[in-house]
Amino acid sequence: MLDEHRSGRLTAWGNALIAGFASPDDAADHIKGDDAVHRVTGLPGETGPVGLTLALGRLRALGATGLRLALPAPGHPLGLSGPPEFNARALEAEEAVIATGAALGLVPEIREAGPEGDVHVEVVWHCVAVRDAPPADVPSLGEAERELAEALREATEVLTRLDVAGSGPVAQAALEAYRARAEAGREVLAPGYPPRAVRVLELAQRVGALIAIAYEPGDGAGREHGGAVSASEMAARAHALRPVERTARRAQVAAYNAMVEERERGQR
């Protein structure tokens, strides 16, 4: 969960562009990241795939006033508003972006190309019509922050109670390693986002790191899933951590969507 979703980058930097905090080329570069190329297909008015810079300009021309992130999971259509065809595509990708004001959604398709050792990643964003309706189950920043504080305590308690091998100093070392990898060379969100959104996203990623640690080898003795040694213990851990993971995903969506939410509140 510490790895930034491509839909998150598109949401954050697309919002920075729309709000005037980033240039089209700068936004496109940050969205692309380390990938070889990003293209958008299915945009109204375009006959074929186009690059990110043109696509972002086209979305604005089509009436997009902001971008929202969706991170759906089975049984939890987080951030989606329909129709079912789009929701299914987004659920398969486990991420999507909704262009508010334009009633369009974008879902990434990841393609790898090149020989072993020199593989590069290409991303195709499929643009389709979506329902103009409130997104599902997205909390406010304040709600997300309160829920995360409790989730962080719950995650720590669960890891300790279920005898996760790395629930003490080892977990802290692993957590710092996760954070170092995630933060190397990247910005948290994009210019124009409120400080609270940055704080909520960082806390959500910390909770996500604890969850990830729970499912990694933790004792160096070949035992997987931390200290779990039986299928029943692994199932118990998954059951206990599922609501914590759900809270962290909701908070991520709230953080990425904060710029749009703040602007809409100011217009009421």
Image (tube, helix red, strand yellow):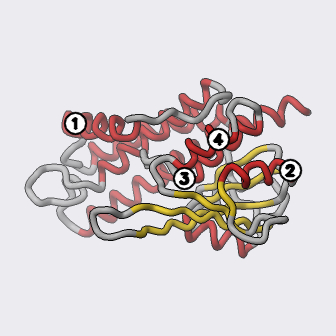
The answer for how far apart the CA atoms under marks 3 and 4 are is 17 Å
Between residues 176 and 52, which one lies in front from this camera angle? 52
Closer mark to the observer between disc 1 and disc 2: 2
From the image, tell me which residue sits under label 2: 61
Q: Is residue 153 visible?
A: no
**Disc sitting over residue 168 in the figure:** 1
- State the image coordinates of residue 266 (x, y, percent, origin top left): 85, 29
Q: Given the image, on which type of amino acid does mark 3 rest? A: Arg
**Mark sitting earlier along the chain (1/2):** 2
The answer for how far apart the CA atoms under marks 1 and 2 are is 52 Å
**Disc sitting over residue 6 in the figure:** 3
Residue ID at (84%, 55%): 102
Closer mark to the observer between disc 2 and disc 4: 4
Q: Given the image, on which type of amino acid does mark 1 rest? A: Gly
- Quick one: quadrant of the C terminus? top right
Q: Given the image, on which type of amino acid does mark 2 rest? A: Ala
From the image, tell me which residue sits under label 4: 25
**Mark sitting earlier along the chain (4/1):** 4
Residue contact at pointers 1 and 2, CB within 8 angstroms: no
Q: Secondary structure at mark 2?
A: helix
Residue contact at pointers 4 and 1, CB within 8 angstroms: no
Residue ID at (72%, 38%): 17
Number of other residues with Cα within 10 Å of mark 3, as a class: few under 14, some 14 to 19, many 20 or more: many
